[in-house]
Image: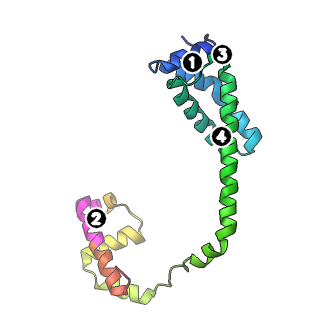
Amino acid sequence: MVTGLTDAELVPRIASGADCEAESEFVRRMAPRIRLYGLRHLRDEHAAEDLMQQVLITILLALRAGRLREPDKLASFVLGTCRMTVLDLRRGAIRKERLLDLYREDLRASVQPATPHLDQEQLARCVRKLKERERSVVVMTFYDDRDGAEVARSLGLSEANVRVIRHRAVHQLRQCMGAPL
């Protein structure tokens, strides 16, 4: 039972690499503290959860590798890791903002226009040109929004056969519509 152990007693058990209970106890003790630190400094619930996971993984890896020289200072090590991780997150956010400011106009210029307007009549003609089985697969997949298993059951085919038929039908539709392949 590890719940009665001090932090200093948990560290060597985690470093041994064979004590999952010690790791679980460490996470149970430290996760709420790390999360609270994240809420105070990041002011975002999701960011605090991400920080908690990142710090716990970092510290567990460090403890397994035996990098904590003074086991009685585990809480300080956790706090320092939290602080450094938050600083890294902030630096990354600042770098990202600077890059966005620097290249914002280039990014706007490179954004592709929305998908071109489909000619509904042409598409209807192309669908009508498909064989009945191909048309059924396409309609059931894209219009009725059914998955491959449902289409296969309805038509008495295997799922693999449905995938092949759908792939070939979509290829034919693209050709008929004049879309690049």
**How packed is label 3: few (under 14 Cα within 10 Å), some, or many (20 or more)?**
some
Q: Which mark is residue 163?
A: 2
Q: CA distance from mark 4 to mark 3?
A: 22 Å
Crowding around mark 1 (Cα neighbors within 10 Å: few <14, some 14 to 19, many 20+) is: many
Nearer to us of marks 3 and 2 is: 3
Element at badge 1?
helix
Q: Which residue is more in the foreground, 113 or 74? A: 74
Tell me: 28 left or right of 33.
left
The amino acid sitting under disc 4 is: Thr
- Earlier along the polypeptide chain: callout 2 or callout 4? 4
Amino acid under disc 1: Val
In the rendered structure, which segment of residues is drawn in magenta? 152-167
Residue 76, percent across and down?
Answer: 70, 25
Residue drawn at (37%, 82%) of the image? 180
Q: Which residue is mark 1?
A: 11
| C-alpha distance separating marks 1 and 2 | 54 Å
Instruction: Give the percent coordinates (x, y) of residue 69.
Output: 60, 20
Gap in angstroms between the C-alphas marked 2 and 4: 46 Å
**Quadrant the N terminus occupies:** top right
Cα separation, mark 1 vs mark 4, equals 21 Å
Residue nearer the viewer, 55 or 48: 55
Left or right of residue 7: residue 23: left
- Tell me which numbered mark, 1 or 2, is placed earlier along the sequence: 1
What residue is shown with label 4? 85
Residue 153, quarter of the rendered image: bottom left
Label placed on residue 72: 3
Residue 68 appears in view: yes
